[in-house]
Amino acid sequence: MAPTKIWAHRGESAHHLENTLEAFHAAVAAGADGIELDVRRCASGEAVVFHDATLERLAGRPEAVASLSLARLRAVRLGGGSRIPTLVEALEATGSLEVNVELKVDGWRPTGVEAAAVEAIRRAGAQHRVLVSSFHPLALLRLRRLAPRLRRALLFDGAHPTACLAPVLGVEALHPDDRLVTRRHLQRWRHLAPVVNVWTVDEAARARQLAAWGVDGLITNDPARIRDALMGL
C-alpha cells in the first residue's frame, strides 16, 4: 500500500495565516507532500488565492474579492502584514510539490474562475503537478472543457452529498469531509474514483485510523504533526 500523502490545508495554516506565501513556504519546510489552496477570480480577471467571498474575516473589510482588481487587492494587508497572492505566485512558491487548487464558486452563475485558474496554471508550467477540485459540479465540467488533461477532484460534505456524480464528471479523486468517512463509505467511494483524500484531519489518532483504512491523502492544517503521527505505520 502506498504511503498516505499529507496535504497542507491552505498551506501550513496551524501556525501561519492561511493561503499566504508564508503558509506555503512553511508547508514545504514542514515536509508536506502537497499543498491545498483556494482560488477566486478578481475583477481584473486574475486568479487570486483567497478562501472567503469577502475580505471581512481576514482584513476587516466588507468588499467582495470579485469586486476588486488585482491592483487594489495587492494593497490589502492581512494579519501580520501578509498580502493576497496570485495563483501564479503561489505555484511558484510551492517548488515541485503537488498543489490542490480549489475553485471557489458561490451560487450557480459562472464567474470565470475556471479559465483564470487554467491560465495561471499554464503560465506557471504546473499542469503536471496540479489537482483542481471544487464542490461545484458545473465548475468541474467547465474545467474539463477548458483543460481536459488537468486532473480533477470532487469535494463534498453533508450539505453537498454529490459523490455519486464522480463518474459523470470524470474526476480522478473524491475529497470527502472527514465527518462522513467510515470504512464502509470508503469502500463505496473506491468504486466511484480511484483516489480518496480526506479533509480536514488534525488529530493524530484519527489520521492513523484513516491511514490504516487506506485513504490516499490527508488534508490537514498541521502537516508536521500529522507526518509525525504517521511515522512507523
Image: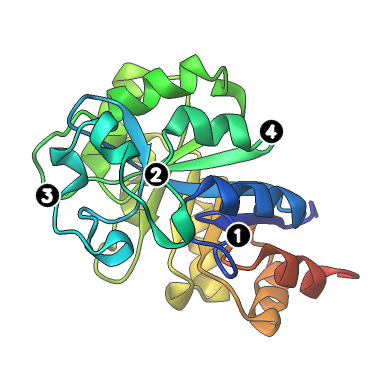
Q: Earlier in the sequence, mark 1 or mark 4?
A: 1
Of badges 4 and 3, the one in the foreground is 4
Instruction: Estimate the x, y position of residue 92 in percent, counting from the top left.
Output: 59, 29
Tag 1 secondary structure:
loop
Residue nearer the viewer, 155 or 69: 69
Of badges 1 and 3, the one in the foreground is 1
Looking at the image, do the residues carrying marks 1 and 2 touch, with CB atoms under 8 Å apart? no
Residue nearer the viewer, 209 or 204: 204
Mark 1 lies on residue = 12
Mark 4 lies on residue = 95
- Tell whether 41 sits left or right of 219: left
The part of the image, by quadrant, that contains residue 48 is top left
Tag 2 secondary structure:
loop
Distance between the alpha carbons at the discs numbered 1 and 2 = 16 Å
User: What's under tag 1, amino acid-wise?
Assistant: Glu
Distance between the alpha carbons at the discs numbered 1 and 4 = 15 Å
User: What's under tag 4, amino acid-wise?
Assistant: Gly
Q: Earlier in the sequence, mark 1 or mark 3?
A: 1
Tag 3 secondary structure:
loop
The crowding category of the residue bearing disc 1, from other C-alpha atoms within 10 Å (few below 14, some 14 to 19, many at least 20), is many
Residue depicted at x 51% and y 31%: 89
User: What's under tag 2, amino acid-wise?
Assistant: Ile
The quadrant in which the N terminus is found is bottom right
Q: Earlier in the sequence, mark 4 or mark 2?
A: 2
- In the rendered image, is residue 216 in sight? no
The quadrant in which the C terminus is found is bottom right
The crowding category of the residue bearing disc 2, from other C-alpha atoms within 10 Å (few below 14, some 14 to 19, many at least 20), is many
- Tell whether 116 sits left or right of 227: left
